[in-house]
Image (tube, grey):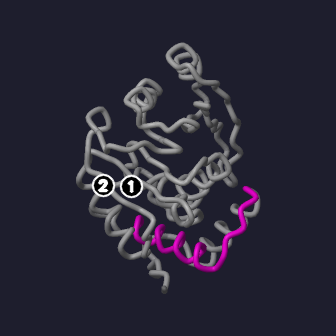
Amino acid sequence: MTTAPLDATEGAPASDLSDRLSRGATQLGLALDGTAQERLLHLIALLARWNRAYNLTAVRDPLEMVSRHLLDSLAVAPFLFGASVLDLGTGAGLPGLPLAIVEPQRRFWLLDSNQKKLRFVRQAVLELRLDNVETVHARMETYRPGRNFSTIASRAVAAADLLGAAHRDLLARPGRLLLMKGRDLDDVARMQDLSHGSVHVHPLRIPFLDVERHLIELRSD
């Protein structure tokens, strides 16, 4: 697979993107093989290209995309549990696509109600040859797949919506709910009040990103 090159108008030489990704992955404790590195860079190239027409993300600089989208998503990899992962409100495929690239042994379902963004996700799955990813066009509150998932993760939804998925038996037992947040941790109290599992808060250090990030983890054991 050949990585799609970024042209000069997109603001960052491919070598700079590759260097930031490899250095960031090392800081996260992730060992990327050549295929994963290529696919992640290809994903950034696709996102930058589609973003000009579809406004998938407010981040325009591909170098910043590596930090804010790839490395931010990959920081969750050590917390994944089990063989099946549901990404609720995936948007432009985050965190699901980067995680599926570095975790090929797991299967991922990427759900969103925005058809425009899912068109991008489907194209990325096709071009990146990710046979461990399925896309789902549905509203999360009405999603009834007839199965459950070992991990349910999201960067975009509120705690109540994520807990709603668990209450609809989408979360396996044992299983993990993973909610990515910034500095606002009000959802921790909500999750503790509304759930019967144990809630843990993990500070996340995202390479090249000087903002507070946390992962709220609910364990249903």
- Answer few, some or many: residues within 10 Å of disc 1's Cα (few below 14, many 20 plus, some between 14 and 19): many
Residue at coordinates 69% horizontally, 62% vertically from top-left? 25
Residue at coordinates 50% horizontally, 16% vertically from top-left? 194
The front one of 85 and 180 is: 85
Q: Which residue is mark 2?
A: 117
Q: Is residue 98 rendered magenta in the image? A: no
- In the rendered image, the residue lying farthest to the top is 193
The front one of 61 and 140 is: 140
Residue type highlighted by circle 2: Lys
- Answer few, some or many: residues within 10 Å of disc 2's Cα (few below 14, many 20 plus, some between 14 and 19): many
Picture quadrant where residue 38 is located:
bottom right
Q: Which residue is mark 1?
A: 92
Depicted 183 relative to depicted 93: above or below: above
Percent position of residue 138, x then y: 26, 44
Stretch of the chain drawn in magenta: 28-48
The front one of 209 and 79 is: 79
Residue type highlighted by circle 1: Ala
Depicted 35 relative to depicted 171: above or below: below
Picture quadrant where residue 203 is located:
top right
Residue at coordinates 32% horizontally, 65% vertically from top-left? 122
Give the secondary structure at mark 2.
Answer: helix
Q: Please tell me which of labels 1 and 2 falls first in the chain.
A: 1
The front one of 9 and 95 is: 95
Percent position of residue 150, x then y: 52, 44
Q: Is residue 36 rendered magenta in the image? A: yes
Percent position of residue 43, x then y: 46, 69
Residue at coordinates 47% horizontally, 60% vertically from top-left? 97
How much space separates mark 1 and mark 2, taking CA atoms? 5 Å
Percent position of residue 46, x then y: 40, 70
Whether residues under marks 1 and 2 lie with C-beta atoms below 8 angstroms apart, the answer is yes
